[in-house]
Image (cartoon, rainbow, N blue to C red):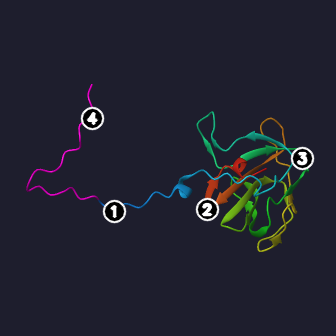
Amino acid sequence: MGAPAAPSRPAAGEKEPKIEDQEPINEKKDKVMLEKGRFVWPVEGTVKTRFGIQPNKTYHNWIKIACPAGTRVMAAARGTVIFSANLKDFGETIIIRHDHDFATVYTHLKKRYVRADQAIKKSQAIATVGRLDETGDAYFNFEIRLKGKARNPLFYLP
């Protein structure tokens, strides 16, 4: 084994290959964002289903949090409610827009306390938990979105 061959130059009369201008790599854009503490937990409970691909090969944009029925769900950060209504397949749903293009989504709630266009404080009660899953546990689903794209909430919660 000798030294690697030197790159060859084009023969006389041949043109140098043209290298297309490429967009520079944006390392910040391509890194997974870990911003622990940007948001607070909306309830004290147990994460029953994690974000992403599940054992049955389905994909969840949310985490499923179990806690006692009647538990108050708190806003994970201050913001403005942009949706508060019943949503087909997701039940009682609240979406809050936050600074820096973030939004939080709360689905499968029992009762909503807030309405669209309402300003919300961090940790303000916005709903209650009450929907039961297949094991009889009360739960709701929680999402964090950045620029409309689902992100793993565990990367942003303390």
Residue 151, percent across and down? Answer: 64, 53
In space, the residues marked 1 and 3 are separated at their CA atoms by 58 Å
In space, the residues marked 2 and 1 are separated at their CA atoms by 30 Å
In space, the residues marked 2 and 4 are separated at their CA atoms by 48 Å
Say whether marks 2 and 4 touch (CB < 8 Å).
Answer: no
Q: For the residue carrying disc 3, how many other residues have a C-alpha within 10 Å: few (<14), some (14-19), or many (20+)?
A: some
- Decide if residue 15 is on the left or right side of residue 140: left
Q: Which residue is mark 3?
A: 69
**For numbered disc 4, what is the local secondary structure?**
loop
Say whether marks 2 and 1 touch (CB < 8 Å).
Answer: no
- Decide if residue 135 is on the left or right side of residue 87: right
The magenta stretch spans residue 2? yes
Magenta-colored segment: predominant secondary structure = loop
**In this rendering, which labeled residue sits more in front, label 2 or label 1?**
1
Q: Nearer the viewer, residue 78 or 21?
A: 21
Q: Which residue is mark 2?
A: 148
In space, the residues marked 2 and 3 are separated at their CA atoms by 30 Å
Hey, what amino acid is under mark 3?
Ala
Earlier along the polypeptide chain: callout 2 or callout 1?
Answer: 1
Residue 92, percent across and down? Answer: 78, 58
Task: Give the label on residue 4, or none.
Answer: 4
> Height in image: 91 above or below 132?
below
